[in-house]
């Protein structure tokens, strides 16, 4: 997976990209084919962080009070912000599973060991026997 983030990324998206790309590359579980999934993950995580900041700054943003005709509390419902957070969290979890970002998904990833690079002597003798 290329370590540089896609053009047009925000600061937070770039920060997430660099953090994950380094770790996934170091673990040997990332490839360039994962780029589009990583792009979606970085963008979704940034949206989730922005919604969390809204809710954290205003705890009442998680629930809506529904009042009856007399102005008495009839029920509490989940707010739009809270529903958006839930959906983003589910999307992130799904992408985290695919990228191996949680213990369970990491345990199912099988990375083939890299074949050792043949040294120059081996290449010379291989060519001598086949040539």
Image (cartoon, rainbow, N blue to C red):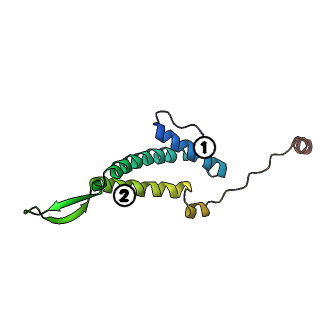
Indicate the position of residue 20 as horizontal and vertical percent values. 56, 47
Indicate the position of residue 58 as horizontal and vertical percent values. 30, 51
Quarter occupied by the C terminus: top right
Secondary element at tag 1: loop
Task: Rate crowding at label 1 as few (under 14), some (14 to 19) or many (20 or more) other CA atoms within 10 Å.
Answer: some
In the image: residue 63, left or right of residue 67: right
Determine the residue located farthest toward the left in the rendered image.
Answer: 70
Question: Mark 1 — residue?
Answer: 1
Residue in view at x 42 percent, y 55 percent:
91
Indicate the position of residue 52 as horizontal and vertical percent values. 38, 51
Question: Mark 2 — residue?
Answer: 86
Residue in view at x 63 percent, y 52 percent:
29
In the image: residue 26, left or right of residue 36: right
Q: Earlier in the sequence, mark 1 or mark 2?
A: 1
- Residue at mark 1 to residue at mark 2: CA–CA distance: 29 Å
Determine the residue located farthest toward the top in the rendered image.
Answer: 7
Front residue of this view, candidates 20 and 74: 74
* In this view, the mark in front (1 or 2): 2
Q: Quick check: 131 above or below 94?
A: above
Secondary element at tag 2: helix
């Amino acid at each position: 997976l290329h370590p540089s983030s896609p053009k047009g990324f925000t600061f937070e998206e770039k920060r997430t990209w660099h953090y994950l790309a380094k770790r996934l590359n170091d673990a040997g579980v990332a490839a360039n084919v994962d780029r589009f999934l990583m792009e979606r993950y970085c963008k979704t995580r940034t949206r989730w962080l922005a919604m969390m900041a809204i809710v954290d700054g205003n705890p009442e943003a998680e629930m809506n009070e529904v009042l009856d005709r007399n102005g008495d509390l009839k029920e509490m419902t989940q707010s739009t912000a809270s529903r958006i957070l839930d959906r983003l969290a589910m999307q992130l979890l799904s992408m985290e599973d695919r990228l191996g970002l949680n213990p369970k998904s990491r345990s199912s990833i099988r990375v083939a060991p890299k074949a050792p690079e043949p040294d120059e002597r081996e290449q010379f003798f291989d060519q001598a026997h086949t040539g």
